[in-house]
Amino acid sequence: MERLARRLGVPDAVVIGLGSMLGAGVFVVFAPAAAAAGGAGLLVALALAGFVAFCNATSSARLAARHPESGGTYVYGRERLGPFAGFLAGWGFVVGKTASCAAMALTIGAYLWPGQARPVAAGAVLAVTAVNLRGIARTATATKALVVVVLAVLALVAVTGIAAGEVSLDRLGSGDGTVRGVLTAAGLLFFAFAGYARIATLGEEVRDPERTIPRAVPLALGVVLAVYLVLGVVTVGVLGADRLAASAAPLADVVTAAGLPGLAWVVRAGATVAVTGVLLSLLAGVGRTLLAMARRRDVPGALDAVHPVHRVPHRAELAVATVVIVVVALGDVRGAIGFSSCTVLVYYAITNAAALTLGRDPARKLPVRLLAGLGLAGCLLLAVNLPPASVLTGLGVLALGAAGYALHHARPAR
């Protein structure tokens, strides 16, 4: 079996995690989350989503250190819970993150050229795939540049909102949030945190994975949670829950409300860069999970190929890019986000269930088994409280995959 090259250290892995997360929540999810939970409810939902993500990150890091190969929870589920659990996790990840890739690409199109969003989105997918096919070191280098730009733009928004004195504490308590609304918002906001798994899915390409992965995952997650909390306070404090819920570009509206509408184009450009970074890492992660599934023949074995020069799963990445372009041509951004959240939460529920089989970890001061149990319960709770259409579609696609798995594995026994 051909192996991928181990080229990434802790800084590279953290940057890939940041590139996977920064942007999705800030530029896409805050508005529907505010509509579901209100102002104060959004901040509670953000903290809840961050806590569930932390539980998942702890479990992912422990499992990735124990099983340092590409595939993430697809591999962990197979090794710890059995082949079917691994398949369900891998299937959920691939279909959910393929939808995420389409949502990110359509967002790029909407910001760059609203009248031609779909062709621009397809072009973005092709460009990002070309970068990924050059090798994981190129992906990490490109992601570093994107992360620097995005952090600068987000800092500009936060400083502008605060310096202009437009942040009102009264607005932070606005909106009529309910418990169900907070849970729905947390499930949607979880979409913004799920990128840290990209570090685990790159487990075969990091140096010293037993040390690198457990350090990189919480570092990336902690930075993103801090950024999201600051921007959550600023956006709600400046716009209020109702205006935020109706906004198509919340951060651009923040600088406009602060009296600097000329900066809106900078924010829109930053949004494009941010989402491009997310798309770059998403496509890399999905391709590597598909490679792991092909190695075990849970998907066509033709996808089990590593490029002899660039050492990347080129066939898997091209297959993912093709499907994403089809979804871009036919799909919808908001529907893709809800569907992705549902399937990815199921993926992480399996992650935590697998982590519970590891037992105690004397080297860690954290109550890792308790965190895994809370993460499992939290994932299921957030998943079932997503919008009904998202839940039904997500569970339906998971059931379809399970049926296909059963038929495939029943054939040799006949």
Image (spheres, rainbow, N blue to C red):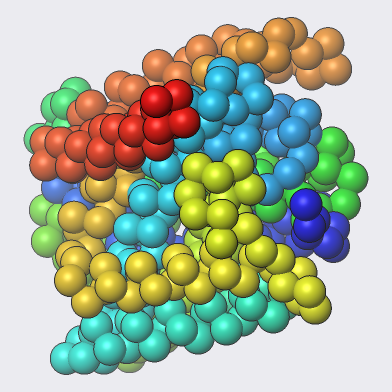
Q: Which residue in the rendered view is the most extreme toward the front? A: 414
| Residue located 25% across and 56% down the image | 336
Point out residue 371 in the picture as x, y percentages from the top left corner: 57, 17
Number of numbered callouts drawn: 0
When asked about the image quadrant of residue 288, the answer is bottom right
Is 320 on the left-hand or right-hand side of 43? right
Kindly give the residue lying farthest to the right in the view shown: 208
Which residue is found at the position 16% from the left and 91% from the top?
115
**Between 186 and 376, the one nearer to me in the picture:** 376
Q: Could you tell me residue 218's position as x and y percent?
A: 67, 39
Where residue 358 appears, as percent x and y from the top left, is 70, 14
In-front residue for pair 374/89 = 89
- Can residue 225 be seen from the camera position used here? no
User: Horizontally, is 153 left or right of 329 in the view?
Assistant: right
Residue at the spot 11% in from the left edge and 42% down from the top edge:
389
| Front residue of this view, candidates 378 and 35 | 378
Asked if residue 331 lies left or right of residue 59, the reply is left
- Residue displayed at 23% across by 27% down: 384
Determine which quarter of the picture holds residue 176.
Answer: top left
Residue 261 in the image: above or below residue 151: below
Where residue 414 appears, as percent x and y from the top left, is: 39, 25
